[in-house]
Image (tube, grey):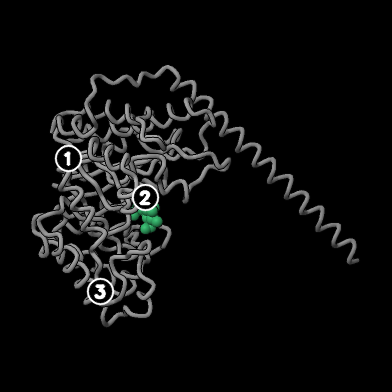
Amino acid sequence: MYKRLMSRRRTLWLGLGTLASIGALFKNQVMSWNNQTQAIETANRDFKVVGGASLKQRAAAKGLIYGVAIRYHNLFSNQKLAAVIAQECGMIVPEWELKWHVGNKPLRPTPDTFDFSAADRMVKFSRTHKMQVRGHTLVWHESLPPWFGETVNRQNAEQFLTKHIQTVVRHYAGQMHSWDVVNEAIEIDDGKPRGLRNTPWWQLLGENYIDLAFRVAAEADPKALLVYNDYGLDYDTPEDEAKRTAVLKLLERLKSQGTPIHALGTQAHLSGGDNRFHPRKLRKFLSDVADMGLKILITEMDVKDRTLPVNIQERDRIIAAAYEDFLSTVLDEPAVIAVLTWGLSDRYTWLSEFRPRPDRLPVRPLPFDADMNRKLAWNAIARAFDQAPKR
Ligand code: 9MR
């Protein structure tokens, strides 16, 4: 009996195994078919760029700002990187240093202290090179300190949030172009009212934490542009569509209750070769945001290459195509004032750790390669700036 059961089980497992491998085979075939079509479609695409101007200059010529996210350690340990940033960028955003707690030199080492030393040095670097700085980010469900859970509770949460925002925003008052005040507050799958994400802040303070954060930030630095920042707003998929709708409603609620919010940041973490890009729908979403009197920033652009061909020329063309298609669509909207990529060089990108290629080849999501040479993605961004209407 036992033997028969085991052998039935084995058959079942074998059956499931076969189904899984047929599924994987099918998926791989679809992927390689997609890749082939993408490679053919982009093979004859012209990514030519006129003149030798930097991205900073091309953006500025249209009243735009181009910038990158960067980590303290990389900026100050790689002179070539720092030089290219100074040459190509009109803005930087510290990738770690203004979050509550990332890395070994966190902004909030203890409940009572703030360590601005890393971010201060980055702000100084930006001033030396006549660049602007964005602050990222005051309220997020990630990168909270290890002491957070045992220290912050319903009784003191409002005080903690208020003090954090007041202290940090005042420290840089008059020096920040903009602040991502609240980051990634929508997650439909969490099943909460109005699509809000089930974050520690939501649990501690309810949905008013969003309004509170913007009000405190506005008081602490009346000059900075205050931004709501989110991802997953890019494609023609049911998930992205639902998220766009929820974000629009959130922005409408905030505007109608007089919350001092000035802009939407759309992160734009794209996937190369994704055929679900729908320019008209994206364009309409941006118009809807602009109609509320809000500005728009493309805050964290990069292009994932997980499923793209091994061949670097083919891969880079597909990535460049994603950059140009997306940027030429969004820059058509005059409310878009800035484009930031989430890093400058493929040497330093969150994707190599968070979304590595299954074959472990180095990922290539950014405009410069690991040796700081311009890639086709650079051409794509330059072309999009050159073609953009003037602000
Ligand atoms: O790129 C960032 C990575 O190095 C950090 O470990 C991570 C956690 O702080 O955050 C990454 O940046 C995220 C950004 O702050 C918000 N949008 C998504 C970005 C990629 O995860």
Task: Read off the residue under disc 2.
Answer: 242
Crowd tier of the residue under label 3, counting other residues whose Cα lies within 10 Å: few below 14, some 14–19, many 20 or above: few
- Callout 2 amino acid: Ala
Task: Choose top left, top right, bottom left or bottom right for residue 36.
Answer: top right
Within 8 Å: ligand 1 and the Cβ of disc 2? no
**Front-lying residue, 168 or 229:** 168
**Circle 3 residue:** 113
**Nearer the observer, 14 or 368:** 368
Q: CA distance from mark 3 to mark 2?
A: 39 Å
Which of 59/205 is in front? Answer: 59
x, y percent for residue 343:
34, 44
Q: Amino acid at mark 3?
A: Thr
- Image x and y of residue 109, in percent: 31, 71
Q: Which residue is drawn at the image coordinates 21% and 45% (left, top)?
A: 289
Residue marked by disc 1:
335
Give the CA separation, mark 1 to mark 3: 38 Å
Distance CA(mark 1)–CA(mark 2):
22 Å
Residue at point 31%, 42% (across, down): 79
Corner quadrant of residue 159: bottom left
Element marked by disc 1: loop
Q: Considering the numbered disc 2 on the image, is that residue within a helix, a strand or a loop?
A: helix
